[in-house]
Amino acid sequence: MNVIEIKDLQFSYDEHQPVLKGLSLTVKEGEFLAVIGRNASGKSTLARLINGLISPLSGEITVLNIDARKKENLYEIRKNVGIVFQNPDNQMVASIVEDDVVFGPENLGIPREEIGERLEFSLKETGTAEFRESMASKLSGGQKQRVAIAGILAIKPKILILDESTSMLDPRGREEVMSVVKKLNRKEKMTVITITHYMDEVVDCDRVAVLNDGVIVKTGTPKEIFSDEKLLEATGMEPPVSMKISLALNKLGVNTPLTLDKQTLLNELLKLTKKPE
Amino acid sequence: MLKDVVFGQYYPAKSPVHRMDPRSKIVLLILYIVMIFIVKNFWGFLLTGGLLLATVFLSKVPLKSMLRSVKAIIFIILFTFIINIFFHKEDGAKILWDVWLIRNVTDKSLYYAIFMALRLLLLVLGSSILTLTTTPVSLTDGIESLLKPLSYIKFPVHELALIMSIALRFIPTLMEETERIIAAQKARGADFESGNLFKRAKALLPVLIPLITSAFRRAEELGDAMDARCYNGSKNRTKYKKLKFSLVDLFGTVLSLTVLAGVILCNLYLGATI
Ligand SMILES: Nc1ncnc2c1ncn2[C@@H]1O[C@H](COP(=O)(O)OP(=O)(O)OP(=O)(O)O)[C@@H](O)[C@H]1O
Ligand SMILES: [Mg+2]
């Protein structure tokens, strides 16, 4: 089943500069989709459109069979689509972790007992229970983003969008956040859309969509995308290191399978060097 | 330096003071401030000071955190002390010191200056107990609940409370950012320490402008994040934390009222010295 269906979407902030120019994309239930594309290609705009923070000029957006263009549906859409933004400092409403996590369910008018259950669940899933009473300002970037995810989880959305949520974090924080998200995708069957510039995060995704100049130019598995050199060049993408090496080897006439996995590449290289002369 | 300001600095701990209903804490703090201002002799300070010490002790807030709040306003305390010691005039005062620059120090002015400094000190310590033991959200929940009657005359109580809690939330963030901008400007050779007041104020301009721009950007992003989390005003909103007047609140109220009675008795029977 498709949880999101976007057809021929057009959008611009001002008339002279269209940002999305007829974008189409479908997202399947439970999948882990990466959206990549160069700066200012319209990735954040797409995320904001899906969640109804802005509305399109023309085209269709359907989220869980609900028309996202209608004002009266916004609340229903936002209940089902959570967004974690880039800057962890600008999405927390309350000073204390717990108080922030319950903000969403409070807005939805959920009864107190159930908010309590959702709070415990969200803290546990994101591994933030140990600092539930801390000031959010005292946490590390990775911890703050996990709290932000907890705040979204408490709303119980079916779809989670990460808009460069790891871009302000150090490698360790990035690892923390991504492992939480992967677990949610696997265990809770949550549909995840991650917008990112880190190709290493893209490698494990089910599917990748490349956004360029206001349209999705290609979707496919990470392997399909990263072995398409023409596409990468046209959209200014750098493949992950292991793909770069295996592509380069193939160009040199050394026959290695194209791979995104560092270990596989290493094994292949070892095999090559061990060849008896 | 800026971090010493204790506004919105919550100290997490499990204590009876932390457990108290924020509404009773706010009301009792107001009562405490009234007490400090009606105290007329040092016996009264002994009582209010005792109440303060007992509260600090019960709250498990380390003295260090308490002293930080004093550090932030130590200049104001010293300033009033010095002003009072030189300029407080009273009939029949005995001159203690009147030599060279330091003139006109009388027994009465010394007494008065100490009295006023103590008053300020007790005021600051008492108020910081409230912010140290109450999370910003429960503080604003308390204010919201106390101001509830005003919503009948269409006063936006919920919005006011939310604005306050967001402001408290952003204080540490903006403090950090200010320090970062100052450091960056210093690295480029900006001078914040020398020159007259006017020059220094001017030097702060390149700090304030990026700070304000960024505050606007933050506000915009926060607005989006709140929308995305289904914020829809106070309509149909529930509160997770319920405010409840419990036994600790009763105890605190009784204790404070007892001290109030003590202060009044001291004023009446032990002489008013101020
Ligand atoms: N609020 C806004 N008002 C006007 N123009 C905007 C606004 N937000 C974005 N834009 C413009 O729309 C275009 C697409 O922006 P968008 O933020 O969607 O790109 P992005 O792919 O998310 O980029 P990045 O990788 O830098 O996050 C950019 O040219 C940007 O300048
Ligand atoms: Mg973006």
Image: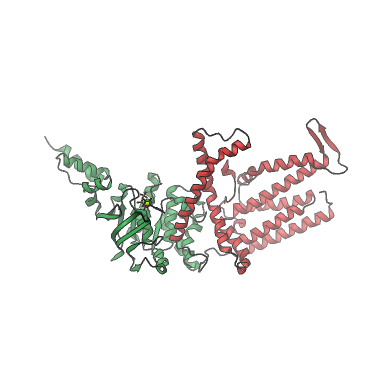
Q: Nearer the viewer, residue B74 or B185?
A: B185
- Residue A100 position in % (x across, y down): 49, 57
Tell whether A268 sits left or right of A54.
Answer: left
Residue A236: image x %, image y %?
28, 45
Q: How many marks?
A: 0
Residue B31 at x, y percent in the picture: 70, 58
Work out whether residue B39 or residue A234 is closer to the camera in this orientation and state it.
A234
Q: Is residue A70 left or right of residue B45?
A: left
Task: Specify the quadrant of the image occupied by residue A28.
Answer: bottom left
- Tell me the quarter of the image containing the N terminus of chain B: top right
Which colour style is shown? by chain
Front one among A267 and A112: A112
Residue that extends furthest to the top in the rendered view of this protein = B100
- Residue at the limit of the structure toward the right, as seen here: B92
Residue A227: % across, % down: 21, 48
Give the color of chain A as drawn.
green
| Name of the residue lying farthest toward the left | A277
The red one among the chains is: B
- Is residue A169 visible to the viewer in this orientation of the structure? yes
Q: Is residue A102 visible?
A: no
Query: Residue sitting at 17 percent across and 44 percent down?
Result: A256
Q: Please state if A215 lies on the left or on the right of B237 as rendered.
A: left
Residue drawn at the location 73% of the way across and 46% of the way down: B118
Image quarter for residue A13? Answer: bottom left
